[in-house]
Amino acid sequence: MNTFVEIPASKSYLLRRKPVYGVGINDADYTVSCKIDGKQVFCPYYNVWKGMIQRSYDRKYQSLQPTYLGCSVSEEWHLFSVFKAWMIKQDWKGKALDKDVLSAGNKIYSEKFCVFVSSRVNNLLGSRKLSKLPLPQGVSQSTQKEKYIATCRSGGISVHLGIFSTIPMAEVAYLKFKSGVVISVAETQCKEVREGLLRHAKIMTDRIKLIS
């Protein structure tokens, strides 16, 4: 596997740098990409930082991924070196940067809210609409008249939870199953992520009480 090597940047290279997506400042004193055995290799810290900036400020990207609308990056993390200094201390290899596992609904990338999580956790709380209609997460309209389907993914598999006569009944079925999946995954995580996931599960159970 090719490993990135930090090569000192020339003055002309540094002068050619522009803000990343209008806000990000790459202040690294090395080139963030290099060629190894003929292949372009990028600084892993820069890749994560740039992706975070893109998700928060690239309107074209957000038009394709609307769940990132309204996201922002804390001012100190606009500076690459500050983000890198934080990331170096994290357990990040093979994991994804997450902003809302610790705090449901959070849209700010910052040291307070961010953590690196496995792909399983990263996909666990992702929004996946099953219908173009304004229906709750996990609920879609059945081909049967005035019936609704509850579906939830678990372990990469779509699980059919049943057909229901009302939207609230289908939503409750989804939330019960989903909260169970979240709790199960939480038991395998570090304390910080586990507690965050359990907070998400509680939100689901509170929602069940509200609509039941």
Image (cartoon, rainbow, N blue to C red):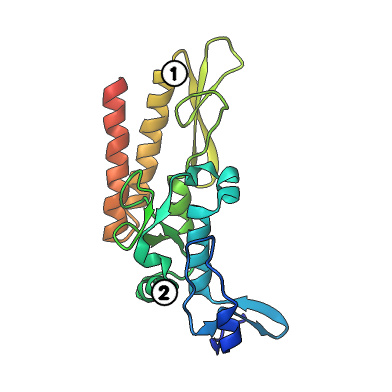
Name the outermost residue toward the right: 38
Q: Residue at x 50, y 24 (%)?
A: 134
Q: Quadrant of residue 190?
A: bottom left
- Image location of residue 49, percent across then percent down: 48, 66
Circle 1 sits on which residue?
A: 167
Going by the numbered disc 1, the residue's amino acid type is Ile
Question: As rendered, which of 152 and 130 lies closer to the eye?
Answer: 130
In the picture, the quarter occupied by the N terminus is bottom right
Label 2 packing within 10 angstroms: few (<14), some (14-19), many (20+): some
Q: Quadrant of residue 178?
A: top left
Q: Residue at x 32, y 43 (%)?
A: 200
Question: As rendered, which of 13 and 64 lies closer to the eye?
Answer: 13
Mark linked to residue 131:
none
Label 1 packing within 10 angstroms: few (<14), some (14-19), many (20+): some
Quick one: label 2 or label 1, which is nearer the N terminus?
2
- Image location of residue 191, percent across then percent down: 26, 59
* Viewer can see residue 3: no
Q: Residue at x 54, y 23 (%)?
A: 133
Against 24, residue 113 (above or below) is above
Mark linked to residue 84:
2
- Compared across the picture, whether 168 is left or right of 28 comes to left
- Compared across the picture, whether 103 is left or right of 135 comes to left
Against 10, residue 166 (above or below) is above
Q: Secondary structure at mark 1?
A: helix
In the picture, the quarter occupied by the C terminus is top left
